[in-house]
Image (cartoon, rainbow, N blue to C red):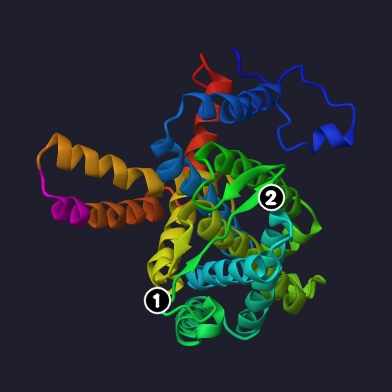
């Protein structure tokens, strides 16, 4: 009875096309954002911020980028880890070469550099698709990992091959480096992710998003009615790589601080982000966040329950985690291909009908 859109009349096109047209949805989102800004930094411990919330935000952004390419445009990619490594390397080189450059500009330039790399590796999508495109992007993953590990210039000739984020400030507050507090990094990261997610949401709701979905559903028919597959697919690869590159830069500078790109952004990261959008929901911005939170939180919960609660060894818990995720992906692909986002839509539909059965 409380979740109703009856009586909420729209008198403007802008109100009718709003992201949250129902007032209750807007109130819930505003309350959630206020809690994320005010409640979490006040009451959350450093472990919760550093080990859970910050990686959830960074991988949510990577999942948004992959969802643009795979969920909206229908181009399967297994090179997410390599593109995240590109963003991390670009961020490191820019921070070292230009110490006075604003950190926000560094992240944007890192995304643009990654978008250029993604544009190059997106060219095969013009001739191949499906499994063959996945293999081509997998080759991009291995090539980029080999390149950054083989050429010492990318890591400024450090013998260990490890890159470390220098300290940087925003509005006088240090947000990168060892002295940066978890609260400062979390607030900056939360703001950036919200802004980029809103931009992506408006992008997929506009003409560009409709072109992507037309190519995804039937590329030949889309070409016949006037869409250009060449520009549309390459634009999807560029925008997706832009988001993934920023996610890699944020993972390197705001979360890990010091990484070896060949290990921190390996093929496992590519599969992990792909599982996020499969479980969260293909073609859904909300699904990107739900999938990232689920994939990152479930291993922590399983480890605590099995190791501390039930007395299993950590190795056994790790093996069970792999079995659990594999079974879960098969379950979602068979029972609910649209993932957790679709389950949330079903819950909202039930709330709109409650207490009546239909």
Reading the image, the residue beneath label 2 is: 196
Q: On screen, 206 above or below 51?
A: below
Which one is earlier in the sequence, the residue at label 1 or at label 2?
1
Reading the image, the residue beneath label 1 is: 160
Q: Secondary structure at mark 1?
A: loop
Q: On screen, 81 above or below 357?
A: below
Which picture quadrant has residue 186? top right
Q: Residues within 10 Å of mark 1 (few under 14, many from 20)?
A: few
Residue 348: x and y in percent read: 55, 29
Q: Residue at x 57, y 64 (%)?
A: 70
Q: Can residue 103 be seen by looking at this rendering?
A: yes
Q: Can residue 217 be seen by looking at this rendering?
A: no
Q: Residues within 10 Å of mark 2 (few under 14, many from 20)?
A: some
Question: Which residue is the extreme one toward the right?
Answer: 12
Residue 329: x and y in percent read: 36, 55
Which picture quadrant has residue 204? bottom right
Q: Which residues are magenta?
A: 312-320
Q: Are marks 1 and 2 in contact (CB under 8 Å)?
A: no
Residue 76: x and y in percent read: 53, 70
Q: Is residue 339 left or right of residue 75?
A: left
Q: Secondary structure at mark 2?
A: helix
Q: Residue at x 52, y 28 (%)?
A: 40
CA distance for labels 1 and 2: 34 Å
Which label sits on residue 224? none
Residue 247 within the segment the image draws in magenta? no
- Total number of numbered discs in the rendering: 2
Q: On screen, 217 above or below 39?
A: below
* Nearer to us in this view, 209 or 313: 313
Query: Which image quarter is the N terminus in?
Result: top right
């Amino acid at each position: 009875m409380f979740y109703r859109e009856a009586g909420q009349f729209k008198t403007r096109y802008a109100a009718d096309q709003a992201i949250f047209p129902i007032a209750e949805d807007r109130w819930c989102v505003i309350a959630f954002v206020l809690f994320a800004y005010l409640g979490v930094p006040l009451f959350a411990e450093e472990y919760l911020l550093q080990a859970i919330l910050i990686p959830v935000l960074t991988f949510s952004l990577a999942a948004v980028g992959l969802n643009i390419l795979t969920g909206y445009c229908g181009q399967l990619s297994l090179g997410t880890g390599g593109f995240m490594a590109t963003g991390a390397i670009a961020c490191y080189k820019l921070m070292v070469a230009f110490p006075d450059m604003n950190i926000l500009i560094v992240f944007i330039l890192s995304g643009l550099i990654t978008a250029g790399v993604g544009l190059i590796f997106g060219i095969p999508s013009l001739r191949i698709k499906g499994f063959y495109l996945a293999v081509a992007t997998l080759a991009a993953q291995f090539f980029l990992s080999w390149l950054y590990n083989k050429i010492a210039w990318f890591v400024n000739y450090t013998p260990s091959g490890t890159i470390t984020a220098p300290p940087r400030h925003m509005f006088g507050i240090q947000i990168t480096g060892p002295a940066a507090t978890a609260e400062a990094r979390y607030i900056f990261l939360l703001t950036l992710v919200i802004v980029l997610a809103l931009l992506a949401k408006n992008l997929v709701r506009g003409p560009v998003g409709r072109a992507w979905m037309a190519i995804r559903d039937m590329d030949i028919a889309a070409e016949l009615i006037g869409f250009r597959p060449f520009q549309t697919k390459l634009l999807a690869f560029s925008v997706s790589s832009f988001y993934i590159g920023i996610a890699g830069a944020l993972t390197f500078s705001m979360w890990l601080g010091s990484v070896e790109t060949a290990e921190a952004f390996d093929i496992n990261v590519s599969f992990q982000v792909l599982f996020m959008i499969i479980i969260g929901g293909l073609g859904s911005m909300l699904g990107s966040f739900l999938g990232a939170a689920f994939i990152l939180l479930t291993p922590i919960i399983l480890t605590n329950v099995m190791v501390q609660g039930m007395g299993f060894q950590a190795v056994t818990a790790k093996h069970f985690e792999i079995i659990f995720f594999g079974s879960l992906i098969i379950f979602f692909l068979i029972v609910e291909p649209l993932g957790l986002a679709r389950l949330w839509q079903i819950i909202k539909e039930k709330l709109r009908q409650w207490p009546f059965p239909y």
